[in-house]
């Protein structure tokens, strides 16, 4: 009975980890923009590898009777370090003038740093309507 | 029961390998340098899970400290590349000019 529970736990964690890592790969290949690719590559692969390492921890604790605490340390380290690295890369990409995707309508960091006019949602809506009118005129 | 776990582990290894190929594709093709850096970071994170699965197949626990090492090296590499691409220096010496 206990073995069935352990095997189901290992299966759930390993399959879930493989699923989230595959989602990360699909996002990295298909998303259109540097920032969205950073978003896919940092979050999803972190969760996938964390689940996989938890499955490996349960396997070694049950079948080999060894509690490997360095796996827990590695999981905690990934969950702390991956968002920090992704945030630093995204910030350096913004300061190196990497263009966002063309459908991006609100750029709050640029607005805050250049101190230009405050764009509320109504401004954005007006801008979209104006661009539509221009397209209709053309 | 162990054979069932082995089937699951082999399946996960195959999925991880395909994932690493996808990351390598974006690393080679990526339009900007930041794409390459962040995809190499994700490649390292995926490699950590791959080593954990491989230690199940090989039935050894001597490979597990390498997971920790790859995590540290990947994080330091990512932070260093981010500082270098943003300002041109990695370690800033002048603390008076907070530019």
Image (cartoon, rainbow, N blue to C red):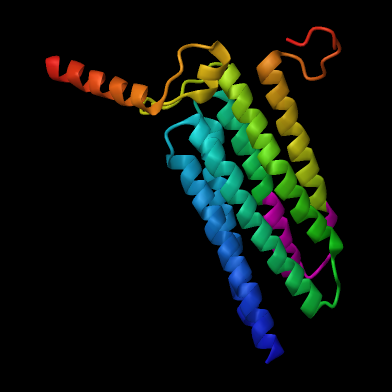
Q: Quadrant of the N terminus of chain A?
A: bottom right
> A98 left or right of B47?
left
> A92 left or right of B77?
left
**Image location (x, y in percent) of residue A66:** 86, 73
**Image location (x, y in percent) of residue A44:** 57, 50
Q: Which residues are magenta?
A: B47-65
Who's the residue at 71% across and 61% down the image?
A53
Q: Is residue A17 above or below residue B45?
A: below
Who's the residue at 47% across and 44% down the image?
A27
**Residue at the limit of the structure toward the bottom, as seen here:** A1
Foreground residue, A24 or A129?
Answer: A129
Membership of B50 in magenta stretch: yes
Foreground residue, B91 or B69?
Answer: B91
Who's the residue at 82% across and 46% down the image?
B69
**Residue at the limit of the structure toward the left, as seen here:** A137
Quarter of image, res B97: top right
Asked if residue B43 shows in the view, the reply is yes
**Image location (x, y in percent) of residue A138:** 14, 14
Q: Is residue B71 above or below residue A104?
A: below
Quarter of image, res B94: top right
The number of callouts visible is: 0
Asked if residue B2 shows in the view, the reply is no
**Image location (x, y in percent) of residue A129:** 24, 23
Q: Report the predominant secondary structure element of the magenta stretch.
A: helix
Who's the residue at 53% across and 60% down the image?
A19
Q: Is residue A67 above or below residue A86?
A: below
Membership of B91 in magenta stretch: no
Q: Is residue B41 above or below residue B11?
A: above
């Amino acid at each position: 009975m206990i073995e069935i529970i352990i095997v189901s736990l290992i299966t759930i964690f390993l399959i879930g980890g493989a699923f989230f890592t595959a989602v990360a790969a699909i996002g990295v290949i298909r998303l259109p923009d540097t920032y969205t690719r950073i978003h896919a590559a940092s979050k999803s692969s972190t969760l996938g590898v964390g689940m996989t390492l938890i499955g490996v921890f349960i396997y070694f604790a049950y079948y080999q009777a060894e509690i490997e605490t360095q796996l827990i340390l590695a999981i905690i380290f990934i969950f702390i370090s991956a968002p920090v690295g992704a945030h630093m890369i995204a910030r350096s990409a913004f300061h190196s003038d990497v263009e966002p995707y063309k459908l991006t309508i609100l750029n709050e960091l640029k607005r805050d740093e250049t101190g230009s006019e405050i764009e509320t949602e109504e401004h954005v809506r007006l801008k979209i309507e104006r661009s539509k009118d221009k397209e209709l005129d053309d | 029961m162990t054979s069932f776990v082995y089937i699951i582990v082999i399946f996960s290894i195959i999925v991880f390998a395909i994932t690493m190929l996808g990351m390598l594709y974006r690393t080679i093709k990526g339009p900007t340098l930041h794409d390459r850096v962040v995809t190499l970071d994700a490649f390292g994170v995926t490699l950590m899970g791959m080593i954990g699965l491989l230690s199940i197949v090989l039935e050894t626990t001597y490979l597990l400290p390498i997971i920790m090492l790859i995590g540290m090296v990947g994080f330091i590499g990512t932070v260093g590349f981010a500082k270098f691409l943003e300002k041109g220096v990695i370690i800033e010496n002048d603390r008076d000019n907070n530019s």
